[in-house]
Amino acid sequence: MDSDQTIPPTPVSYFLRRIATFSTIPKPSCCFCVIQSIREPGHPLYDDEDNAGKASPPMPPREGRYEVVIDNDIITRLDLSPFHSATGITSPMSAEGVFDRTIGFTINYKRGDENDPRELSEFPDIRLWFVRLDAMYPWLPVLLDWRAGELARYAAMLVPHQMSMRMGVVFNPEALELFVVQKVFVVYSWLKEHDDESSMPRLKAKDMARMLGFGIGDDLFDLVDHHN
């Protein structure tokens, strides 16, 4: 190959296949999360919201899940101890027993102004708490209570988005793509290290991406394994 010839970069979209999927955000945020792109006029966010698709309500929390309860004081101090005490996960290397139950969050947040219309994912201090949690445990999304909407709400805490009165959270499409791929990389590697069932890491990583509206083929995992 000519030394002056360069290999064109592989776009993230090559490995992702957007699928028509809706995810929901449960109470207390009280809003729906729709996996859609933010576009100029023509997108229902800007035009005819009455004709836009509406997300289905979330399923009830999974019975027996770990419940992490946080409030204003915990959030302000960036205190992760409620997560540690509720789940038993105390370090990034923790893995024993974590696959037996899912994890959910109860956010008891008191607004400074009771008439503040913002959703929980729009408050910078709440988002900062989740940013710190994610920095400490980047593989956490795979353990969340997906069916109850915890994965969608977690993504809303970390990914730029806009609010639609009818549809709820509408993610920035490129930011969501990068978030999904980054989490797939992290979760796949972590599961291979800690999960005894060799066939599950790919399946779980694929299922996680699908919950956020993306299909991922085996070619991405083959590439990772080949250069690991």
Image (cartoon, rainbow, N blue to C red):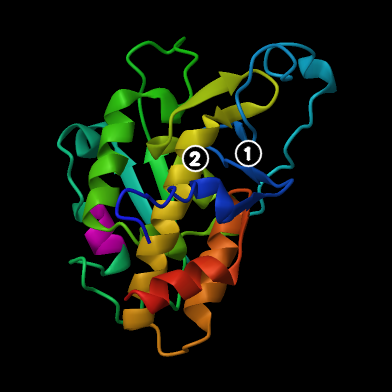
Q: Residue furthest left?
A: 77
Q: In this picture, which residue range is highlighted in magenta?
A: 82-86
For marks 2 and 1, the one nearer the N-term is: 1
Residue at 47 percent across and 76 percent down: it is 201
Q: Is residue 120 above or below residue 225?
A: above
Q: Nearer the viewer, residue 157 or 181?
A: 181
Residue 113 is inside the magenta segment: no
Residue linked to disc 1: 35
Q: Position of residue 48 (x, y in %)?
A: 80, 13
- Residue farthest front in this picture: 2
Callout 2 touching callout 1 (CB < 8 Å): yes
In the picture, measured across the screen, residue 61 lies left or right of residue 125, that is right
Q: Name the residue beneath numbered marker 2.
A: 176
Instruction: Provide residue 110's location: percent of width, then percent of height.
Output: 35, 25
**Is 10 positioned to the left or the right of 58 in the image?**
left
Amino acid bearing label 2: Leu
State which quarter of the image contains the N terminus.
bottom left
* Residue at (53, 22) in percent of width and height: 162
In the depicted view, which residue is nearer to us: 41 or 108? 41
Can residue 103 be seen at all in this image of the molecule? no
Q: Is residue 13 visible?
A: yes
Quadrant where the image shows the C terminus? bottom left
Relative image position of residue 16 (x, y in whole percent): 58, 53
Identify whether 82 is placed above or below 125: below
Predominant SS of the magenta segment: helix
As helix, strand or loop, the secondary structure at mark 2 comes to helix
**Badge 1 amino acid:** Ile
Q: Residues within 10 Å of mark 1 (few under 14, many from 20)?
A: many
Magenta-colored stretch includes residue 84: yes
Q: Position of residue 214 (x, y in %)?
A: 62, 52
Residue located 35% across and 56% down the image: 2
SS at circle 1: loop
